[in-house]
Amino acid sequence: MLKRFLSYVEIMTKITSTLTFLLTIAYLLYKNYTIDWKLTLIFFAAMFVFDLTTTAINNYIDTKNNHQTLQFNRKTALVIIYILFVVSAGLGLYLAYLTDIVILIVGAICFFAGVFYTYGPVPISRQPLGEVMSGMFYGLLIPFILMYINMPKGTFLTLNYNWDMISFDIMLKPFATLLLFSIIPFSVTANIMLANNICDLDKDIAVKRHTLPYYIGVKRSLYLFAGLYYITYAAVIAMVILKILSPISLIFFLTIFLVQKNINALFKKQEKATTFLSAIKNFIIIMVVNSVLIFISAII
């Protein structure tokens, strides 16, 4: 039962959210912010369970459309989705109750995008938006929420409202720092989706699933795939220059040889069973090494 459940929710794919979470925790420790572990762990639980939920929804819909077999009968599979959704929504609402309306709004956006990624008349996964959406929600909003609940109130924005007026102020420097920091998880997460869509292009066209590679072609998609990795190195340089990260983070450049090897593998052959793994390998290399280096910087 447990084995089937873990297969249903594709537990191994949760490295995307988990490693982004750890990368952001490392940054908060490096910057000497006091982490509110109660809020942080509630967020992690809500994030993780909702990640399971979206994968379950994706598998439920895809197996229906592709006439494939689920790990459970369809009624049981649907009940599991409802349970996961209620648990994640409950945790998200509790976090919003403990914090403020900003978390409620951002959380609602995440839930809406997660559900309609696969579900609905025009699912996000069938459009050329999958890479951007996955990168944004995993790579940008996870760091934002974690930083927002652990940094002093008003660091990123202030939202005041009453019956007569709503005022909204964004602090540009902290937001610019967040965007620069988010380039790393955004790029490597988007590339997992991009590699998947490159390898599945023929299958997707057959079921009228028009993803980004359908519109820009395989050659341009591969160049984009490589470019997104190179951007992570540029982002690290920029963050070190701007003193967002320690010079220790420049050790990250030693990984470029392994990353390039995996890029070359996908350029040579676009095959789901073999070379798609190059995107997973690069994700792990880039996220783990950056996280470890930032943790080391925090200790030193």
Image: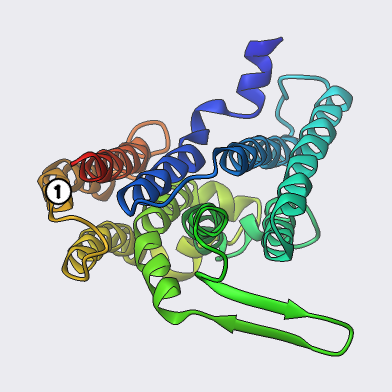
Q: Residues within 10 Å of mark 1 (few under 14, many from 20)?
A: some
Indicate the position of residue 86 as horizontal and vertical percent values.
83, 38
- Residue assigned mark 1: 256
Q: Is residue 218 visible?
A: no
Q: Nearer the viewer, residue 78 or 268?
A: 78
Q: Secondary structure at mark 1?
A: helix
Q: Is residue 30 visible?
A: yes
Q: In which quadrant is the N terminus drawn?
A: top right
Indicate the position of residue 114 as horizontal and vertical percent values.
68, 52
Asked if residue 281 lies left or right of residue 160, the reply is left
Q: Residue at x 35, y 32 (%)?
A: 274
Q: Nearer the viewer, residue 4 or 298?
A: 298
Is 14 placed above or below 102 here?
Answer: above
Q: In which quadrant is the C terminus drawn?
A: top left
Asked if residue 36 lies left or right of residue 178, the reply is right
Q: Residue at x 55, y 59 (%)?
A: 148
Indicate the position of residue 110 as horizontal and vertical percent values.
67, 56
When asked about the image quadrant of residue 291, the answer is top left
Looking at this view, name the residue that lies furthest to the top: 1
